[in-house]
Amino acid sequence: MINHLSGRLVEKYPTHVVIECGGVGYQVHISLNTYSSLPQGEQVRLFTHLQIREDAHTLYGFSTPAEREIFRLLLSVSGVGASTARTMLSSMAPAEVRDAIATADVRAIQAVKGIGAKTAQRVILDLKDKILKIYDLDEVSPKTDNTKREEALSALEVLGFARKPAEKAVDEVLRQDSSTSVEGIIKSALQNL
């Protein structure tokens, strides 16, 4: 297994780079996220994932270990191959992919070219618990509640409550019933503060 490559960046394209290490040029497939973080013609270090198939040995490179971890998690989902995972990481930053999965934001994942509703739901179903555990995240409220959540938080701040305790109270209310109105969220959160 090749963990990383350190060498001189010889060629740089949006889909791949060539890195010269010890006189050997390695072609490494990259995401647009990694592409934008690489300098031209300088010493670089890419964290890699080697995919071995009958017909090819393909090396994928990432600017950070976190991006590689998200890539590997995506590969573990049935129906998501390296090409789809790389497209996701080209369309969204690794943190955005992580957050979309953690918040079960099907629309954000489905917005990626080539990912339909079923695949987006499968990604969330397979990876949500892993993402929450790996990144030590608390259960997060879905994105659809953000407007109501923000309105409720603003109202609680106007009433003099600190942001952090207000967020915990509002998130707890939304976790119990995400269809609650803004007024209902505020009333229930006040009982918890």
Image: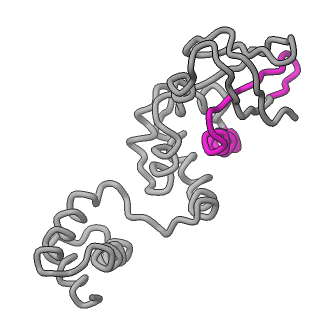
- Please identify the quarter of the rendering in which residue 60 is found: top right
Q: Quadrant of the C terminus?
A: bottom left
Q: Quadrant of the N terminus?
A: top right
Question: Percent from the top left, x then y, of residue 164?
Answer: 33, 74
Identify the coloring: one colour
Question: Percent from the top left, x then y, of residue 87?
Answer: 54, 27
- Is 121 left, or right, of 56 in this rendering? left
**Residue positioned 53% across, 41% down in the render:** 94
- Please identify the quarter of the rendering in which residue 25 is found: top right
Query: Magenta stretch: residue 57 in it?
Result: yes
Vertical relation: 157 (above or below) 105: below
Vertical relation: 20 (above or below) 182: above
Residue placed most toward the observer, 187 or 96: 96
**Residue positioned 41% across, 49% down in the render:** 105
Query: Magenta stretch: residue 52 in it?
Result: yes
**Residue positioned 25% across, 82% down in the render:** 189
- Is 87 left, or right, of 182 in this rendering? right
Vertical relation: 103 (above or below) 67: below
Q: Which residues are magenta?
A: 51-78
Residue placed most toward the observer, 90 or 17: 17
Residue placed most toward the observer, 4 or 168: 4
Q: How many marks?
A: 0
- Please identify the quarter of the rendering in which residue 29 is found: top right
Vertical relation: 125 (above or below) 1: below
- Is 156 left, or right, of 78 in this rendering? left
**Residue positioned 50% across, 42% down in the render:** 120
Q: Residue furthest front?
A: 42
Question: Percent from the top left, x then y, of residue 185?
Answer: 22, 76
Residue placed most toward the observer, 50 or 100: 50
